[in-house]
Amino acid sequence: MTNEAVILTQALTKSYGHAEAVRGLSLSVGRNRITAFLGRNGAGKSTTIKMLLGMIRPTAGSGTVLGKQIANTGENREVRQRVAYVAEDKPLYGYMTVEQTIRFFSSFYPDWRRDVERKLLHDYELPLQRKVKMLSKGMRTKLALLLAFARRPDLLILDEPSEGLDPVGIEYLLQVLVALSADGVSIFFSSHQIAEVERVADHVCILEKGRLLVDASLDQLRQFYRRIDLVFPFSPPEGEFRISGVERIQTSGHQMSVFASRNAEAVIERARDLNVVSIEIAPVGLRDIFLETVKEN
Amino acid sequence: MVPSPEKRASRRCLISRRQADFAGVIPPWKPDSLRLGAHPPKPHIRAGYNVFLTGVLLRCTFTVIQLGDMFFKLTPTTGQPLYLQLMQQIRHGAETGALHDGDQLPGIRTLAEELVVSPNTVAKAYSELEHEGLLELRQGSGAFVCVKRRTRSLADQVQVARHRIRDLIERLREDGLLDEEIRRAFEAELLYPAEIVRRR
């Protein structure tokens, strides 16, 4: 395939009355990658995902999923054949048993993967004869995931897949994501589980109030984000450190703390020129990057 | 004041734990105990999984995986890409003799599933190591270690380096520096090795 992006949006916007849920979102999700979509509750993640799947219409802007226009009904139908989606609320038929649900869903997909179904039934310990409405929240999530994973999709879109899962369930979920990724499935998932995202994701997008604030590979984040704590023999001039890449400066007496998304070496050189007494450089984890980014805005 | 032998021993233990926490800077497993076979082989997933749960409790997630005679430990929260951590650990394994010439590493998919990291991470580490000549990737049959003689002699260098670091740390302690201060100084110097050293 020539097109490297499985999801591509341009200035995608969705307003509900005066409230803008998504504002001018330009997103590009790479093929064969695991991309995580982070943001606070109400940041616009689910709205974006629903627009990508054609479930709601964008107010403005455009986008493609697997090269097909999201606002075109005909093309959208094709996309849905090739994209597996697990919604936030995991809607399933409560009156069916687990087994009936699996048979029902599998009948729609000719290349349903029995091997994946069998493995997940075993790993997730789902009770085949229990009615869906009697399942716990975690089991419901597991069943919804099984239905999506066994479909052999080109693209997997998951809206908070780990919600309601215990640590063991999350571990199984991540292992399946990794296995599917190795099979060539592109994965786009929203999550609040930053520690998990940090392990498996290749790329991270952080959304806040409908805007994309961070769009970078985790390798880049790990390599360039730094917190630099400095102590000077005098009250340091903040202005000297307002260079590109410096996201936030806090000063207190002779101490200064700089949060940089890149250019940390330049900050250190400047500090040395100003006869800094002590320099501490610490890498910044995804949790802190998320909190700092969201706090700033 | 000279600390009691017990206190010194416990401080040394702490330092080596902290060194491990540098993750990748000083590789986290202990080659000595490996060579003596102190760690009997365990099922991969189980080893990684128990540690994962502990990691969750400590709010610092990491995974340890044993591969044949080798342990891998990737720490997502350090300021170093995971593929670099993996590369360094494989390289270190070859240098210290934990990995031998011709040893087979697991396929990209298998290792990614065991470490629970993106397959792209493993693929990138393998392909960079192939570029360096340390791995040979054979289509369909996995990755094989190629250790040249020169690499082997690095094991001795690493041994010497460890002694020098230990001496340096002892001297700094005698100068009255606290372990915490020594650790910070090491971290500050190590985090920007390439950029700053080159410019000096």
Image: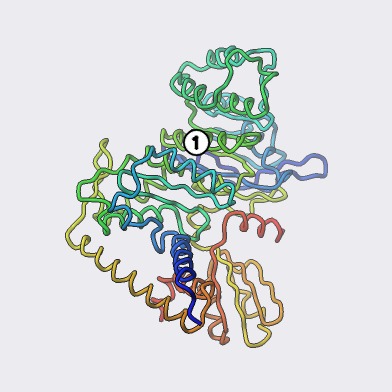
Which residue is at a point 69% across and 76% down the rendered structure image? A251
Q: Quadrant of residue B144?
A: top left
Quadrant where the C terminus of chain B lies?
Answer: bottom left
Q: Amino acid at mark 1?
A: Leu
Figure check: B5 above or below A271: above
Picture coordinates of residue B127, whole percent (x, y): 32, 50
Is A67 placed left or right of A232 in the picture?
left
Label 1: element kind: helix
| Side of A155 relative to A291 (left or right) | left
Q: Which of the chains bears the disc numbered 1?
A: A
Residues A277 and A44: in front is: A277
Q: Position of residue A239 (x, y in %)?
A: 66, 79
Name the residue: 20% across, 46% down.
B102
Q: Horizontal placement of A250 versus B64: left or right?
A: right
Name which residue lies at 62% across and 50% down: A206
User: Height in image: B120 above or below B97?
Assistant: above
Label 1 sits on residue:
A177
- Crowd around label 1: few <14 · some 14–19 · many ≥20 (10 Å): many
